[in-house]
């Protein structure tokens, strides 16, 4: 989601020190299409383990503004959020697909497509993955960033078609950038119960 990119920018200073990062997004979708969205970002820096330091006030302020913006979205409640020098966690409940799509729209700097959509009793998910703005730069996110997207459904999935996702059981799909072919977009569609 675009708001994740904003969170990552809070850590801009640390990009030169990064050894590895993990960005994990989890969606749990209920039968009524409400659900829970959780995102976590953690990074490991080069060098020795350092003492946990306080987050800069400016970074803390930006993060708090983002949480308020998300919480102001209709049909969304932020359940928990935390920020540290080495990462962040956000957990929220969404009332319906429009709610979770609105989080992406209200926090993006540019017009973004809906992540979830519903048509003819089929649920579609399409996510444009963040790309390196400078492909020739010395910092290549594919080497230091692992991005996982995990989508779990209340009931087992029927008639799944996916690009980039792997079905790991009857209720769960996962995308893992460390095991992908460099997708710029990931997607799936599933048939819903009537």
Image (cartoon, rainbow, N blue to C red):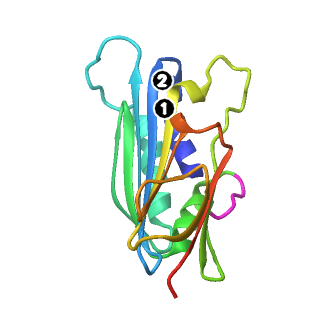
The residue located at (55%, 50%) in the rendering is: 3
Q: Which residues are magenta?
A: 110-114
Picture disc at residue 184:
none
Residue 178 drawn above or below residue 163: above
Do tag 2 and tag 1 residues touch (Cβ < 8 Å)?
Answer: yes
Residue 170 lies, in percent from the top left, at 41, 64
- Taking depth in this image into account, of 142 and 51 the one nearest to the observer is 142
Instruction: Specify whether residue 113 is painted magenta.
Output: yes
- Taking depth in this image into account, of 122 and 43 the one nearest to the observer is 122
**What main secondary structure does the magenta stretch of the protein show?**
loop
- Taking depth in this image into account, of 11 and 166 the one nearest to the observer is 166
Along the horizontal axis of the image, is 101 left or right of 67?
A: right
Residue 31 drawn above or below residue 103: below
Label 1: state its secondary structure: loop
- Taking depth in this image into account, of 55 and 110 the one nearest to the observer is 110
Q: CA distance from mark 2 to mark 1?
A: 6 Å
Q: Residue furthest top?
A: 47
Residue under numbered circle 1 = 11
């Amino acid at each position: 989601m675009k708001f994740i990119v904003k969170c990552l920018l809070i850590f801009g200073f640390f990009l030169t020190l990064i050894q590895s990062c993990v960005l994990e997004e989890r969606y749990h979708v209920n039968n009524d299409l409400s659900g829970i969205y959780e995102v976590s970002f953690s990074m490991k820096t080069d060098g020795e383990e350092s003492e946990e330091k306080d987050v800069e006030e400016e970074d803390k302020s930006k993060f708090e503004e983002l949480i308020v913006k998300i919480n102001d979205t209709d049909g969304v409640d932020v359940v928990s959020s935390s920020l540290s020098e080495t990462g962040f966690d956000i957990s929220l409940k969404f009332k319906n697909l429009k709610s979770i799509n609105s989080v992406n729209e209200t926090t993006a700097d540019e017009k973004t497509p809906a992540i979830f959509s519903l048509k003819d009793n089929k649920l579609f998910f399409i996510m444009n993955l963040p790309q390196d703005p400078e492909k020739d730069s010395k910092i290549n996110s594919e080497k230091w960033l692992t991005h996982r997207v995990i989508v779990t459904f209340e009931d087992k999935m029927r008639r799944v078609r996916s690009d980039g996702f792997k079905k790991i059981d009857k209720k769960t799909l996962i995308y893992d950038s460390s095991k992908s072919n460099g997708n710029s977009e990931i997607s799936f569609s599933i048939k819903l119960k009537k």
